[in-house]
Image (cartoon, rainbow, N blue to C red):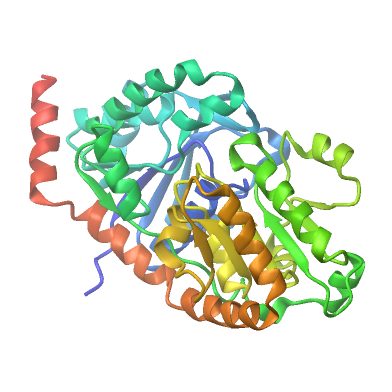
Amino acid sequence: MQNPSRKIAIVTETFPPEINGVANTLRYLCHGLADKGHRLQIVRPRQPQARQVPVHASISAPEDQVSDHQVAGLPLPGYPDLRFGLTTSQRLKRLWCEDRPEAVYVATEGPLGWAAVSAARDLNLPVSAGFHTNFHTYSRYYGAGFLEKLITLYLRRFHNRAGTTLVPTQRMRQYLQTLGVERVQVWSRGVDCDRFSPRWRSTELRHAWGLQDDDLAVLYVGRLAAEKNLQLAVHCYERLRHLHPHAKFVLVGDGPLRRRLQERHPDYIFCGMQKGEALARHYASGDLFLFPSKTDTFGNVVTEALASGLGVVAFDDAAAGEHIHHEINGMKVPLQADADYIQAALKLADQPSLLKQLRHEARQKALELHWREIVEQFEQKVLNPPSEERRHAIKQSVSLL
């Protein structure tokens, strides 16, 4: 039975139309919640005027179901297009006393998220936190590896102050538990199989990339940044094109490594940031999809590539660990097996019949991943938390009196 209409506060440092995994997840989540009749209050940093989009329009929801509360924000180090929010728990308490939500979901762990958890605890509101990004491991890719332990301690304390922490995979749940995070539950991810589909394959786009019908398009979609392990993707492609000289490497996305990659590899095809139907065409017009990251908590691009009917090569982790069955609907190898990763890609390039089989099965797997069911999972975990988590929230609230 569908829950009656409820009010949910979503607290986040990033939100559509920004392009990243967290914003993408929140787009589908918020659209699904609004479609089920829930009222949403989005609490987020104020964006530059040139990038302002009405919050209801960014998730395709009715205007009267979504309110937008913006706070001060500053650029996030290493991610200048993103901002972290600055406010106090007292301000959020005043906001929520005026129009009390029935649950609070905190998607990001910055100062805004900390203030939101504190305010929710003080008001005895059920509060859940999402673990969307491995920021503690990212530090080693930006010359700040010495901060990793400190960031880990902060994240553990942050999440243990919430009633529950939601993670996208069983493996991530187990990992956070080893770090000392308590009350961790799995909340998975879906994929839009109407938007991402082989039907968007474009011969015209492939020709623009310099490919003939039987040539191989090796695709990467995502942020062009150090934490994405792009060096392995480059090495893999160079090995592959030595055997398949007509193959092309197509990179969709932007980031701090783009200029350096373009200077070193002017023959690669850099498509920049794509969205909507253009992104769907880029996916579907590829053949082999490289996902070399070892730091993603999920990696929505993996399920989008599966839905687009691509031969995915990834490590046995995150989305690939959950949804890819080796040599059945994709290729996955152990996390430390870089040589095996390259061999898996070469095997697909060398065996067109295997690649064709995997691409068909990839699409079939993606068709099982419905956002509707994911939204219902969220409703259950956030709006109806287990009684032990309610008791924990009450206990924490009383302890602050």
Image quarter in which the N terminus is found? bottom left
The percent coordinates of residue 146 (x first, y second) are 48, 16
Q: Residue at x 29, y 29 (%)?
A: 156
Q: Residue at x 70, y 79 (%)?
A: 352
Residue 72 at least partly seen:
no
The percent coordinates of residue 167 (x first, y second) are 34, 49
Left or right of 9, for residue 333: right
Nearest the viewer among 74 and 169 is 169
Nearest the viewer among 400 and 177 is 177
The percent coordinates of residue 166 (x first, y second) are 31, 48
The percent coordinates of residue 372 (x first, y second) are 39, 71
Image quarter in which the C terminus is found? top left
Q: Residue at x 25, y 71 (%)?
A: 2
Left or right of 17, for residue 161: left
Give the quadrant of residue 169.
Answer: bottom left
In this view, 120 is above or below 91: below
Give the quadrant of residue 9.
Answer: top left
In this view, 46 is above or below 371: above
Q: Residue at x 23, y 32 (%)?
A: 180
Nearest the viewer among 219 and 115 is 219
Residue 151 at least partly seen:
yes
Give the quadrant of residue 101.
Answer: top left
In this view, 287 is above or below 80: below
Left or right of 325, for residue 57: right
